């Protein structure tokens, strides 16, 4: 509410509910992202706790790599994957607002349909429709650019 008062005090009062809803949606999204990242890294790094819990402990120092090829893909494959990800991000940015919002909440932030509907202020059926349309649009755009799905 403070962000609304600070940044939008010059706006007409009739716009406040919509602005407040958008600010609230963004704050909720940010909180979900933060929680997801923190829990992922906390879980991953907690398995590498040092014997003496030294602050300078680096989990990467304990990794033993017998065969560098076992690490996965070649540099060319990594570059190709990065290019595809950049293409996907551009195509997501081109989606209509509601489709992009529903798609990101469902598939990027891994929210369920009821959570997404509550945040977006719409029905669960509407969320399903937006996600379906976004998925079909993205698939068509990626196929058009030669990405094999």
Image (cartoon, rainbow, N blue to C red):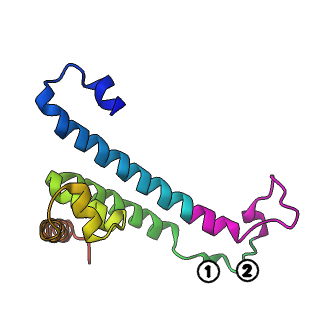
Asked if the residues shown at circle 1 and circle 2 are in contact, with their CB atoms under 8 angstroms apart, the answer is yes
Check disc 1 and report its element: helix, strand or loop: helix
Q: CA distance from mark 1 to mark 2?
A: 8 Å
Identify which residue is drawn at 30% across, 44% down: 24
Secondary-structure class at tag 2: loop
Displayed quadrant of residue 129: bottom left
Q: Which residues are magenta?
A: 40-62
Q: Is residue 59 magenta?
A: yes
> Where residue 66 is drawn, which disc sits there?
2
Disc tally is 2
Q: Residues within 10 Å of mark 1 (few under 14, many from 20)?
A: few
Which quadrant is the C terminus positioned in? bottom left
Q: Position of residue 41 (x, y in %)?
A: 59, 62
**Which residue is the extreme one toward the top?**
10
Outermost residue, right side: 52
Q: Is 33 above or below relative to 69? A: above
Quadrant of the snapshot with the N terminus = top left
* Percent coordinates x, y for residue 134 in the rendering: 17, 65
**Pointer 1: what residue?**
70
Asked if residue 137 lies in the magenta stretch, the reply is no
């Amino acid at each position: 509410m403070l962000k609304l008062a600070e940044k939008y005090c010059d706006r007409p009062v009739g716009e406040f509910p919509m602005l407040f809803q958008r600010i609230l949606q963004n704050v909720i999204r940010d909180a979900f992202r933060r929680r997801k990242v923190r829990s992922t890294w906390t879980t991953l790094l907690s398995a590498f706790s040092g014997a003496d819990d030294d602050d300078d402990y680096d989990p990467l120092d304990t990794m033993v790599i017998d065969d560098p090829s076992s690490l996965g893909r070649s540099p060319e494959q990594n570059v190709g994957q990065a290019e595809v990800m950049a293409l996907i991000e551009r195509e997501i940015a081109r989606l209509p607002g509601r489709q992009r919002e529903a798609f990101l909440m469902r598939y990027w932030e891994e929210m369920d349909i009821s959570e997404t509907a509550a945040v977006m202020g719409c029905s669960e059926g509407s969320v399903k429709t937006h996600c379906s349309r976004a998925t079909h649009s993205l698939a068509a755009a990626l196929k058009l650019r030669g990405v094999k799905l």
